[in-house]
Amino acid sequence: MKTVNRFLLIAGILSLAACTKDSLSTDPGKIQAGFVKGHVVDTQGRPLAGATIIANNSIWVGKNVISTTDANGNYKISLPNEPGIGAFYVRGSVKMKFEGKTYQLPLFTEDDDTFMPDEGAVKNLQLKLWGEKTGNFGDEGLYGGTVEVTNRTSFSTGDIEFKLEPIALIDGTQGETLTFHTDYYTAQGVPIGKYRVSARRISTNQPLYIRILDSNQAYEKSVTTIFQSSYYIEDIYEMHIEVTE
């Protein structure tokens, strides 16, 4: 399996460069006043059925409208249009089963800007496992999960390289082997999946021992694990590991 390290690593943030299409290929039709509609696809460009789509009002929380995509990945939402209603923007998510657990993953909104109900809009969305979010209307950060590191060695975390070998990703793809090192004990933007994790000391190339944090298991040269829901926010996913000499 090919090992890659094509990441943006800033202050412990790890993100794989997106390799999805720049534009979604299915045309949902012309803009229609009073409606927002669009087409939703998975990471391979296939229609994504059962995704939750929300037309969020930029002023009034009680005016949000929720819909789901049909079998062809299409949705159409009728927008309230009344004096002072303000503009809308679109967000989406999809629930996926993986390794006996349910994950709720956010969707990327193409052409992510606001629109007025009387204008209507077409907003396509796509599942992304990595890459930057839109940065608009609170949609900040990176897609994927966070690896949290607890260092039990006698040297700094910056001298440790971690390797994540994917067994499978949540979208059914194989993925690529990832490596990272950081002084900040976290790496963000890792695609959700099942990984074999190992570590080495960079300065000496010494293999290190690793286990899932607080698992009461013996340290091993590698551990196989998945991302779990955060202790605090259900749809934030983390992998907690500890490393020793």
Image: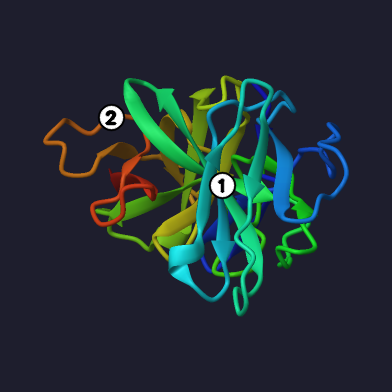
Q: Nearer the viewer, residue 106 or 190?
A: 106
Q: Residue 195: where, in percent of width, then height?
A: 44, 29
In the image, residue 73 sits, relative to residue 58, either above or below, namely above
Which residue lies most toward the bottom here? Answer: 84
Q: Nearer the viewer, residue 153 or 46?
A: 46
Q: Residue 183: where, in percent of width, then height?
A: 45, 65
In the image, residue 45 sits, relative to residue 19, either above or below, namely above
Residue ID for mark 1: 92
In the image, residue 228 sits, relative to residue 147, either above or below, namely above
Q: Residue at x 86, y 38 (%)?
A: 29
In the image, residue 66 sits, relative to residue 158, either above or below, namely above
Horizontal side of residue 154 vs 177, given as left or right? left
Horizontal side of residue 243 vs 174, given as left or right? left
Q: Nearer the viewer, residue 111 or 5?
A: 111
Kind of residue sitting beneath label 2: Glu
Residue ID for mark 2: 220
Kind of residue sitting beneath label 1: Gly
Image marks 1 and 2: residues in contact by CB distance under 8 Å: no
Q: Quarter holding the N terminus?
A: top right
Q: From the image, state whether disc 1 or disc 2 is nearer to you.
A: 1
Q: Quarter holding the C terminus?
A: top left
As helix, strand or loop, the secondary structure at mark 2 comes to loop
Question: Label 1 to label 2, Cα distance in Å?
Answer: 40 Å
Q: Residue at x 71, y 50 (%)?
A: 36
Number of numbered markers: 2
As helix, strand or loop, the secondary structure at mark 1 comes to strand
